[in-house]
Amino acid sequence: MSKMGDHVIKLQETPAMMECGVCGGSGEYEVDVPRPQGFGRDVGYLDSEVVRCEECGGDGEVVRPCIGCGEAMSRWDEMQGSVCEDCRNEDY
């Protein structure tokens, strides 16, 4: 196959990615952690810690969904618009 054909196939197999909406692209976010009272402290308090984002797995990116059906889009679909090939064929 030609180089151009190989490139198009690669684009069709590679998922389109977008910034994670949960962590804002950083791959981690801060959560509140309740700390109970103890021998050295008479009241509990809220502490915070940074955790890895579960939505994106710490990568900061998630697969871009099609606005028509919600399925994952490929890089080729992303170049053609904001809907996948199936939705384009249905005249979304």
Image: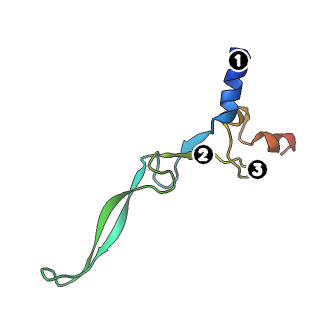
Front tag of 1 and 3: 1
Q: Which of the pair 2/27 is nearer the observer?
A: 2
Q: Amino acid at mark 3?
A: Gly
Question: How crowded is the residue under tag 3: few (<14 C-alpha within 10 Å), some, or many (20+)?
Answer: few
Question: Which residue in the protein does label 3 denote?
Answer: 68
Q: Amino acid at mark 1?
A: Met
The quarter holding residue 14 reads top right
- Compared across the picture, whether 31 is left or right of 6 comes to left
Front tag of 1 and 2: 1
Question: Which residue in the protein does label 2 denote?
Answer: 63
- Comes first in the chain, label 3 or label 2: 2
Q: Amino acid at mark 2?
A: Val
Question: Which residue in the protein does label 1 denote?
Answer: 4
Q: Tell me, what colour scheme is on the image?
A: rainbow
Q: CA distance from mark 1 to mark 2?
A: 24 Å
State the mark number for residue 13. none
- Compared across the picture, whether 39 is left or right of 61 comes to left
Q: On screen, 80 above or below 35?
A: above
